Image: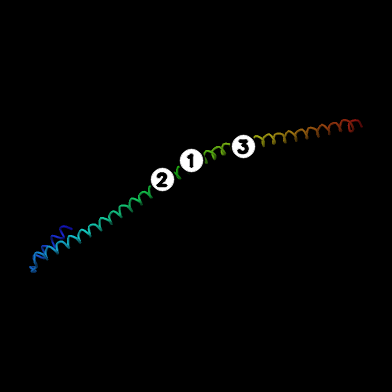
Amino acid sequence: QFERHRVLVRAIALARVPCSAGAMAELSADTRGQQLLESDRKLQQARSNIMEATRTALETEETGFSVLTDLARQREQISRTTNQVDSINHNITQSRQVMLQMSRRAAIKRVALWVMVVLLLVTLVLVVYFLWIKKK
C-alpha cells in the first residue's frame, strides 16, 4: 500500500500538474486515510477468514474423533462377532461328529436286528421241520 502511495505521488509530480503544497498535502492525507481504511477492512476480512477456518478445523476435528470412536466400537463388535462365529463353528463341528456316530450306531443296530430276525426265522423253520416233518 505504501508503494502504491509513492507511485501515485510520483505520477502527480511527473505530470507537472500545477498544484499547491496544501492541495498536495490534502491529497496525500486523503490517500493515506483511504489506504488505512482499506488496510483495516482487509485486516478485518483476514481475521474473519481465520476465525471461519479455525471453526471449520475444530468441527472437522470433532467429526474425526466421533468417526474414530464409532470405528473403534464397530471393530470391537466385529471382533466379538468373529469369536462367536468361531465358537458356533466349533459347536457345529462337534454336533456333526456326534450325529455321525449316532447314525453309525443306528445302522449297526439295524443290521444286528435283521441278523437276529433271520436267525430266529431259520431257528423257527428248523424247529418246525424237525418237529412236524421229521416225525412223519
Amino acid tagged 2: Phe
Instruction: Please state the horizontal and vertical placement of residue 1, each as a whole percent of the image.
Output: 18, 58
Q: Is residue 61 left or right of residue 100?
A: left
Residue positioned 60% across, 35% down in the render: 94
Q: CA distance from mark 2 to mark 1?
A: 17 Å
Q: CA distance from mark 3 to mark 2?
A: 45 Å
Instruction: Please state the horizontal and vertical placement of residue 56, each as a whole percent of the image.
Output: 36, 52
Given residues 13 and 80, the one toward you in this image is: 13
Q: Is residue 97 left or right of residue 40?
A: right
Amino acid tagged 3: Ser
Q: Which residue in the protein does label 1 denote?
A: 76
Q: Which residue in the protein does label 2 denote?
A: 65
Where's the C terminus, which quadrant?
Answer: top right
Given residues 18 and 67, the one toward you in this image is: 18
The nearer-to-camera label among 3 and 2 is: 2
Q: CA distance from mark 3 to mark 1?
A: 28 Å
Residue 92, picture quadrant: top right
Q: Secondary structure at mark 3?
A: helix
Q: Residues within 10 Å of mark 3 (few under 14, many from 20)?
A: few
Given residues 75 and 134, the one toward you in this image is: 75
Amino acid tagged 1: Glu
Instruction: Please state the horizontal and vertical placement of residue 68, each as a whole percent of the image.
Output: 42, 44
